[in-house]
Amino acid sequence: MKAIRTLVVGICAIAFLTSTALAAEKTCCQKAVAEGKECKHKCCVAAHKDGKSCEKCNPNKEDLKKKSEKKGEQKDDKS
């Protein structure tokens, strides 16, 4: 029983660490903004022209969050 319990705890720990590592992965738009560029994916360019977020690449609208953070930093620098 101890071996099974230890195995289950180990598998859960590995699953937890893997999920947190994958959650920290940046989207294409976030990578581009971090480099000071615009994302060049066709779907993202079309969505950004409309002031929206690309649902395919950024299901949680991460690109818009990153842009607003970047704009906030620039406003602080100008003050």
Image: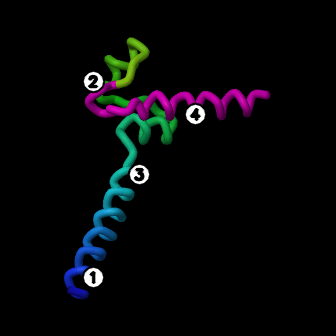
Q: Which residue is mark 4?
A: 69
Mark 4: which secondary structure?
helix
For image coordinates 33% across by 70% down, the residue present is 13
For image coordinates 32% across by 32% down, the residue present is 59
Mark 2: which secondary structure?
helix
Indicate the amino acid at tag 1. Thr
Q: Is residue 22 left or right of residue 67?
A: left
Considering only order in the chain, which callout, 4 or 3, is on the residue closer to the N terminus?
A: 3
Residue 41: x and y in percent read 29, 29
Mark 1: which secondary structure?
helix
Q: Which residue is mark 1?
A: 6
Considering only order in the chain, which callout, 1 or 3, is on the residue closer to the N terminus?
A: 1
Q: Residues within 10 Å of mark 3 (few under 14, many from 20)?
A: few
- Find residue 24 and name its label: 3
Magenta region includes residue 40: no
**What is the distance, in whole Å, between disc 4 and disc 1 at their CAs?**
43 Å
Indicate the amino acid at tag 4. Glu
Asked if the residue at tag 4 contacts the one at tag 3, i.e. Cβ–Cβ closer than 8 Å, the answer is no
Nearer to us of marks 1 and 2 is: 1
**What is the distance, in whole Å, between disc 1 and disc 2 at their CAs?**
46 Å
Residue 58: x and y in percent read 34, 33
Considering only order in the chain, which callout, 4 or 2, is on the residue closer to the N terminus?
A: 2
Considering only order in the chain, which callout, 3 or 2, is on the residue closer to the N terminus?
A: 3
For image coordinates 73% across by 32% down, the residue present is 76
User: Which region of the structure is painted magenta?
Assistant: 54-79
Q: Which residue is mark 2?
A: 43
Residue farthest along the front direction in this orientation:
1
**What is the distance, in whole Å, between disc 3 and disc 1 at their CAs?**
28 Å
Indicate the amino acid at tag 2. Cys
